[in-house]
Amino acid sequence: MSAAGLSGAFLHRSADLHMLPRSEDDDDGRRQKRREKNRAAAQRSRKKQTQRADRLHEEYKCLEQENLSLMKEVQTLSEEQRRLTEALKAHEPLCLIMHCSAGLMSHARLELLAGGLPR
């Protein structure tokens, strides 16, 4: 016996137990209603899934844009670090403060150096 035949037999037995006669039209109507409800639920589910996928795609695009921006910033900062390192290396041979320890410098010379530095 097929699954449909079994479910139909069960419905008829169930109807006999409750003494509620069911006709084939009632069964068909219920089946049709259930299919329509299922179809509507499936459509809602697909719509919700599509909306979620759209949101994720938009979030992905925003994150990609942010990532590009951050990579450019890293590039800019790396270049600035390189330039500042080169400037420091060029300055080190000329720097009086770095070549003389504070203990060996006279107090007057320290004041002179301090006065010449911008505050």
Image: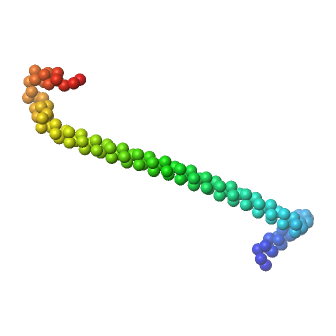
On the question of residue 17 being in view, the answer is no
Nearer to us in this view, 112 or 7: 112
Q: Residue at x 91, y 66 (%)?
A: 21
Vertical placement of 74 versus 11: above or below? Answer: above
Nearer to us in this view, 100 or 7: 100
On the question of residue 35 being in view, the answer is yes
**Which quarter of the figure has residue 93?**
top left
| 40 horizontally vs 86: left or right | right
Q: Residue furthest bottom?
A: 1
Q: Position of residue 77 (x, y in %)?
A: 31, 43
Q: Residue at x 80, y 70 (%)?
A: 7
Nearer to us in this view, 54 or 3: 54
Q: Position of residue 66 (x, y in %)?
A: 44, 46
Q: Residue at x 16, y 37 (%)?
A: 91
Q: Position of residue 53 (x, y in %)?
A: 57, 55
Vertical placement of 110 versus 16: above or below? Answer: above
Q: Residue at x 81, y 74 (%)?
A: 5
| 64 horizontally vs 72: left or right | right
Q: Position of residue 97 (x, y in %)?
A: 14, 31
**Which quarter of the figure has residue 111?**
top left
| 108 horizontally vs 37: left or right | left
| 2 horizontally vs 47: left or right | right
